[in-house]
Amino acid sequence: MNSFSRLPLYWRVCLINGMVFVVGTAALAISPATVSPRVLVSEAVVLTIGLSVILVLNSLLLRTSLAPLDRLIRLMESVDMRHPGQRLPEAGSGAVSHLVRSFNAMLERLETERGRSNAMALAAKEAERHRIAQELHDEVGQGLTVVLLGLKRAVDRAPDEIAEELRLVQETARSSLDEVRDVARRLRPGVLEDLGLLSALSALATDLSTHSGVHVRRGFAPGLPGLTPETELVIYRVAQEALTNAARHANADTVELSLSKQGDGVALLVADNGRGLGSRPEGAGIRGMRERALLVDGELNVGPRIGGGTEVRLVLPVRAKP
Amino acid sequence: MTPAGTTRILLADDHGLVRRGVRLILDSDPGLTVVAEAGDGAEAVAVARDQEIDLAVLDVAMPRMTGLQAAREISRGRSRPRILMLSMYDNEQYFFESLRAGASGYVLKSVADQDLVEACHAAMRGESFLYPGAMSALVRNYLERVRRGERVPAKVLTPREDEVLKLVAEGSSSKEIAEILTISLKTVERHRANMLQKLGMRDRTELTRYAIRAGLIEP
């Protein structure tokens, strides 16, 4: 049986068919059955039964050989790259299971490739955001500041009836400036670049407490190794996403945000006391975090926290600053 | 020649037009006069070293040397002028970092036309100038600490100051507070000043110490 299952698929089909024909022919030769020149009804019945037996036998034998192929086709048709990790069992050692193994390996490669290209797209997006934020800040922001300062001088010297109108314009310019600043900040956290990762994480924590009332407990270990800007940005974005999830979906009232040394690398932990993940499938947010982690060879784990809630842990290797 | 009693100001911003606008605002106040301008941080440090100034107004984000780095250098220097930061960012991390760098105040560009002159005078009196966002962040943090039952040293606030405190924590501006409590803007400002004094957030050193203790910034 073992050497049979190692045969190429073509020879297996030939062999199965051959065997069935041999059995049929042998039955015809050995049994006393004969066929008259003009076929009798009884003979026709025997022939029909014989033929059916041959067909059924053939189909059963072929089916056991080809079933994995059907399963493979079904998976190929239904595989969804957005939910990685779908694989076929790789039992047996025949040609079909070889195909299954090749297919599994291909899925693996595709998933890794997809992750990488997503990471590249993310990096490109961040770079673009950076540029836009910079321009908003340097060009539009400064321009509006000049307008505001000029208006102040104009208001001070204008006659009353015009001053009132100018004041309205002034307030519009002021709120536009605030808006430009907020848009630029959402596009790119300036704090990260100017003041470093810990200040940026602190600012995230304060923002969350201010806007959602969730209490954030901070714990930043002293003497963390120096990180590359890319790594810092990944940590920042993952923390941002995890904190947002904790406040928005998990209904948590306390979140722990910590950054510590782990072996040669650093570990970011965001743990909330909310209602946990449950059996919900991974959302776009978590996938996004995974892809970002992949960008700097990090490992992201999302799971239940001991004592209830959710825990997001990101472990990153440290590479020396370029 | 600047008349005695006027504050001599060094103004640093990399954007020429902004510099011109700020200069016009500052010069229009009889007590203030801009005696030097700089286009980046390094230039500001050099000017502060070579020239007699009382106050440096620095943009937080500048090329070559950021305003924060320049503030650190200038406050370490011999003449030790007062320092004010001018910034686009409404973020208390910048504010605290500015305090740590030696600045006594932080003025948002979006309200510079209203606040800058007042901030200059406050800095010269040795007081810190808190922009509204930083004020509410500090007060909110204070209230949270009280709620959690932490021992927070503070002298007892009057009921009126307490009301002002809560409104500040909710992010109301002085003008809004004045309207809500139907008192004058001047009275609100006085309550705010008293409140800060009692909470131990009056000047730069106290504020920095508070922020570090409260975990708002890293020590």
Image: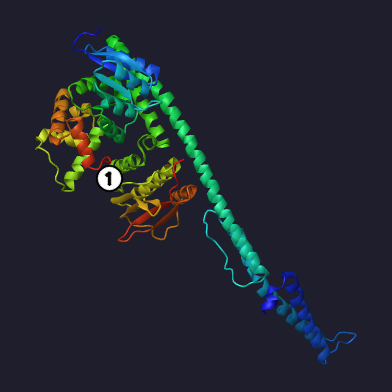
Residue A14 left/right relative to B213: right
Q: Is residue B165 above or below residue A108?
A: above
Coordinates of residue A47 in the picture (x, y in percent)? 80, 84
Residue at 59% in and 68% down: A90
What residue occupies the far bottom of the structure in this picture? A32
Residue at 78% in and 78% down: A18
Q: Is residue A173 above or below residue A156?
A: below
Residue at 50% in and 43% down: A122
- The chain identifier of the residue carrying mark 1 reads A
Disc 1 crowd, CA 10 A, few/some/many (<14, 14-19, 20+): some
Q: Is residue A41 visible in the rendered structure shown here?
A: no
What residue occupies the far right of the structure in this picture? A37
Q: Is residue A260 visible in the rendered structure shown here?
A: yes
Residue B30 falls in which quadrant of the image? top left
Q: Nearer the viewer, residue B87 or A144?
A: B87
Coordinates of residue B199 in the picture (x, y in percent)? 15, 36
Q: Nearer the viewer, residue A13 or B46?
A: B46
Coordinates of residue B136 in the picture (x, y in percent)? 23, 35
Dot 1: element: loop
Q: Nearer the viewer, residue A224 or B144?
A: A224
* Residue matched to label 1: A213
Q: In the image, what residue type sits under mark 1?
A: Gly
Coordinates of residue B128 in the picture (x, y in percent)? 21, 28
Residue at 58% in and 55% down: A109
Q: Is residue B62 above or below residue A205?
A: above
